[in-house]
Amino acid sequence: MSALSGEQIRAARALIRIDQADLARRCGLSLETIKRLERIRGPVDANSRTLRALFEVFAAMGVAFDNCEDGGVGVCRSAGKPFRTALDTARPTATPRQMDQPPAETACHRLIYYSTANRENAPPLHELLEQIQTSGARRKATLDVTGILYAQAGRFLSVLEGTRDSVRQVFGAISCDRRHSSLSIISDQSAPVRYFPDWSVCCGRFPSDAQMVGDEPSLRKGFHPEALSPASALGLLNVMRDLQEASPRNDLRSRSPCPLAGTCLDRACAERAAISTAPGPANAGV
C-alpha cells in the first residue's frame, strides 16, 4: 500500500472540510493519531491498517491521490465519483460541468506561488489588499483567472486558476509588480478541475482559526509559505477560502479602516489598518 504524507492528509481533510476529530471518528483512529500523522513532513510512519482506513475514508468521500508532473503526489477528486463534503449543504467548489474533463483548449491550469511584501514600494498592507481584491476581480471578468490570496505577517500565498495562457499572462504581470519581492513558484501545472471558481483575498489570524489551522506548521511564529508542499499549500488555501466566508471575516467590507483590527492577531497589519487611509490605485495585483 502506497504511503501518505502528513501534507496529503491535511490537504485531503481540508478538501472535504472535516476537522481532525471527525476524521479520527470516521477512520476508527484516535484523535492523537491523526494529529501526530499530520505533523509529519513526508511519508507518515503508520501501519497498514491505519493507512487503509485513511484511504478508504477519503475514497468514500470522493478524494483520490494522483501523480503530479513533478513526481510528487497531489490530492484531487476521484474521477467518476461524486464529491462529498462533511456537510451536505456545503457550497460546492465546482459545478457539475467543471467536474467533467474539460476540452484541451480550455483545460484548467493552476499556479501556486508565495512572495513577501516590499515595504519600500508598497502601501500599508491593508491598502495593498484592497488593491489586490480590485485587480483580482478585474482579472476574473476579463481573463477568467480566479483563485485566492492569503496574507499574513507581510507574506503572501496565492493560487491562480484558468487556461494556461491566461494564468501565465497574469503571473507575468504579477512577477513584475514591485510591491512584493522574493517571489517563488510552489506548483505550476495542469489541474483536473478548478477548485477556486471565484477570486477572494483572505488576511489575518483570529482566535477562531485555531480549530482549522492551529496545527499547521507553516503558521507557527508567523507565516512561512516556503515550508509548504504543493498539496499542503492547496489544502491551506482551501481552508482559508472557507474561513474567509465565515465569521468574523465574512463581515469585512473594507480594510480602510479595518473593522476587525481590534481582534486580529496579525498586529503589524492590524495596528495600521485601524487608521483610515485612502486606498491607492489598483495595479496588476500581487
Image (cartoon, rainbow, N blue to C red):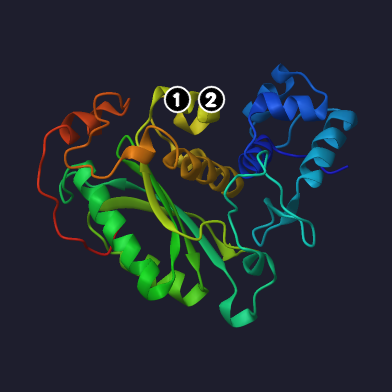
Task: Provide the residue designation for mark 1.
Answer: 208
Task: Specify the amino acid type for callout 1.
Answer: Ser
Write down the quadrant of residue 7 in the picture.
top right
Where is residue 106? Give x, y as percent.
Answer: 57, 78
Look at 67% across and 44% down and name the residue there. 88
Q: Identify residue for label 2.
A: 211
Front position in the image: 77 or 244: 244
Q: Position of residue 44 (x, y in %)?
A: 74, 32
Relative to 239, is 248 on the left or the right?
A: left
Tell me the kind of residue under disc 2: Gln
Residue 134 in which image quadrant: bottom left
Which label belongs to residue 115?
none
Q: Mark 2 packing: few (<14 Cα in 10 Å), some, or many (20+)?
A: few
Residue 79 rendering spot, x and y as whole percentages: 77, 61
Mark yes or no: residue 175 visible: no
* 45 in relation to 135, above or below: above
| Residue 110 on image: x %, y % | 53, 62
On-image quarter of the N terminus: top right
- Classed neighbour count for the residue bearing mark 1: other residues with Cα under 10 Å, few (<14), some (14–19), many (≥20): few
Residue sitting at x 11%, y 39%: 276
Answer left or right for 259 relative to 69: left
Farthest-out residue, bottom: 105
